[in-house]
Amino acid sequence: MLALRIKDKQMGYFFILPAALMLLAVIIYPAIYSLKLSFTSESEALYSLTNYAELFRDALFWQAFRNTLVFVGVVVTLHLVIGFSIAMALNTRIKARLLFRLIVLLPWTVPDVVAGITWKWIYDPVYGALNDLLSRLNLIDAPILWLSDPKLAMASIIFADIWRGFPFVMLILLSGLQAIPRELYEAAKIDRASGFQSFRYITLPSLKKIVGVALALDIIWEFRRFGLVQTMTQGGPGHQTEVFSTLIYKEYFQFFRFEYASAIAVIMSIILLSLSLPYIWMISKE
Amino acid sequence: MKKSTKWLLMSLVTVFILTAAVTLSFGKVTLRFSDWHMGEAHWLKALEEAKVIFEKQYPDIKITFEPVSYGEKETKYITASEAGQAPDVMHLHAYSLAAFIEKGYALDLTPFINKEKAGFLDAWYALPLTLCTYKGKVYAMPGDYMAQVLVRNTELFMKAGFDPAKPPVTWDEFLEYAQALTVDRDGDFKVDQWGFGMIGAKSPGFELRFSPFVWSFGADYLTEDMKHSALDTPEAAEAIKFFVSLYREYGVAPPGATAFGPFDVRTQLAQEKVAMNIGSGWTVPIVDSINPELGASQVLEYSAVPVKRKAITSAWLSAWIISPNSKHPREAWEWTKFITSKEMELKWFRDASVLSARQDVSGVSLEILEDKHAKVVAYELAFAKFVPQIKEWPEIIDAVTTAVQEGLIGVKTPEKALADAHKRINAILAR
């Protein structure tokens, strides 16, 4: 029996080996390499903190940091609000529920870059559908510069990202809603609880964990959002929509400053790790 | 014949054919060739034809195409080079050439060149060759070499009452023309045609179109020793103010310029939304592919970029590099030599309207010198200048583009934006 258990254990290790090796090759090794790179500089032979010192003095780094916080904060909040509202609506017994669920999921199936290009065309001041629609409705006299107006550029990207990303949060929350036993609501009804009371005392507490998971995952993903911003504005105009991911890309692939880009990536990873800790803690608790 | 015998025979024949195929292909070298042009139908056709000719001449070499997008080529090549997996032959533009050479992503071609007959490099213009040379060694072979010119739609010129044969010569005239060409065509009291297609997005296409403004106004990006920014001059301020005023003050460029890259502006030109832009040899075939109904080769005319104080424009160069990780450098050199040969460079002109960095092609071929578009591009080469070839350049031009964008969107005055760019460039160069 014991021998069998040891054999089982070995088999377990055997099965996770390919995945572990893959992780080692595509995540662990590059992470260690980047970390090492971030402590080197072209001008100094030994390891140093030069890149980190420069980074904290760099106004562009701080602007990208602020922009990232705004982008992630607004997008994740609205993903949650919209995703939750639609999940609630799609959890009721409406006609053609399956069809609606499929339609709502569609934006999630669109790749990041494709969504960026599509929205760039929608926002185009000369050919774009949005300005054309507003103009036909006599709502505007001159085209709105969705991606060129410093007050609108970030909001326009955020809107596009909300469109693309809310179905993911919606889907997680919908699965959470479907897992709540119907009996709880029936019991509440018998006790003459109002709709709001059912929501407040049954729905919300039951979804607490799943909301946590959705939030953690969404924050991590939005923090790394690259394709959409890059295709729509490349961080511009000026640096109005510069986020960490576009800044790292620029420093690494356009400016050839591998060491400095790695330092920014390390800082970003630290922030992301600290944000994912509650999620890891939640998972490991179960 | 029994069924099993039949199967046995068929299997044996299959094995034989496979063995023969493997044996025949044994010893054949496969070269990985990457070029952004593979994404353009007319170019792909031309390259495929060239490949057939080459493979006939060199039966032991097989060329495989690896397409890459223009905007993503550096990303792909850097990643692949760092991993030691870069294609054998890659196509770059001058923008990133210096950095690729300094980073060690390009093989020293000098030993191959030395084995060619004496004066091998004499066929090329000197200026593009200097860009391919680093510390006395040649790391790249020049490809296309073209000057930026003013592209204008002659039909729209005529509609505005201009003589289509008389392009604007000075920037002041250019502004007058652009104002007259900015009109409401459909009578709904909204402008739907603009005089000038402005590229304001962060793209390698920006420096090509913006630099003629800077240089022609008498300014420059860097000091002669390339150690400091030279953007603190009144001429530089005048240049950026003029460029920004075209958009903000005079409104002769379509709204949203900071989001427009070269393709957006070419689309506007193809759809007759703009009457003029700055382009080069590639403009007519690309515009033609976007809107064949325009009849780009007839309607579009080229002329010199307008002048303020100096007649000057920017030069475009593309170059071919061989990866130092190539397992077949000799064969890669043969392919590079072939695609930069006189015959092939003429083919690229016939098929894609690009001019060569070879003076025995662009400087003497009657085909080019008698072509109404190519002859302008070729003539303007005498006034063409390259942006500084230092590895910090991409970062420097990003600072300049940022300043121009800040001026265009009005978050800073052009002077303030330029002063900030000047400071940032000095900080970059002081590192």
Image: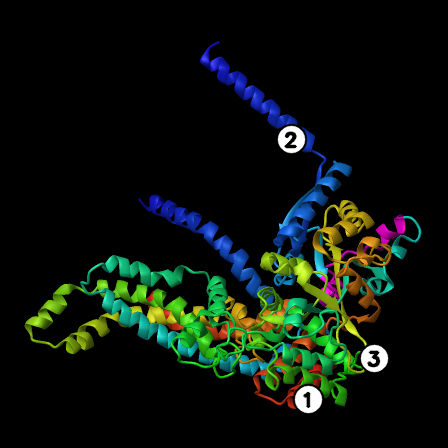
Tell me whether marks 2 and 1 sit on the same chain: yes
What is the three-letter code of the residue carrying label 2?
Val
- A62 sits left or right of B50 in the view: left
Q: Is residue B95 magenta?
A: yes
- How many numbered circles are shown? 3
Q: Which disc, if any, is residue B419?
A: 1
> Where residue A233 appears, x then y in whole percent?
54, 73
Q: Is residue A39 something that shows in the picture?
A: no
**3D distance between C-alphas at marks 1 and 3:** 19 Å
* Residue A251, above or below B6: below
Which of the marked residues, 2 or 1, is nearer the chain's N terminus?
2
What is the three-letter code of the residue carrying label 1?
Ala
Which residue is situated farthest in the right direction here?
A: B118
Q: Nearer the viewer, mark 2 or mark 1?
A: 1
What secondary structure is the stretch in magenta mostly built from? helix
* Residue at the spot 44% in from the left edge and 75% down from the top edge: A158
Chain that bears disc 1:
B
Which of the marked residues, 1 or 3, is nearer the chain's N terminus?
3
* Circles 2 and 3 in contact, beta carbons < 8 Å: no
Local secondary structure at mark 3: loop
Residue placed under numbered mark 3 in the picture: B224
Specify few, some or many for label 1: CA neighbours under 10 Å numbering under 14, 14-19, or 20 or more.
some
Q: Nearer the viewer, mark 2 or mark 3?
A: 3
Which span of residues is magenta-colored? B93-116
Which of the marked residues, 2 or 3, is nearer the chain's N terminus?
2
* Circles 1 and 3 in contact, beta carbons < 8 Å: no
> Where residue B121 appears, x then y in whole percent?
88, 55
* Residue B79, above or below A232: above
Residue placed under numbered mark 2 in the picture: B22
Which residue is situated farthest in the top direction here?
A: B1
Q: Is residue A224 magenta?
A: no
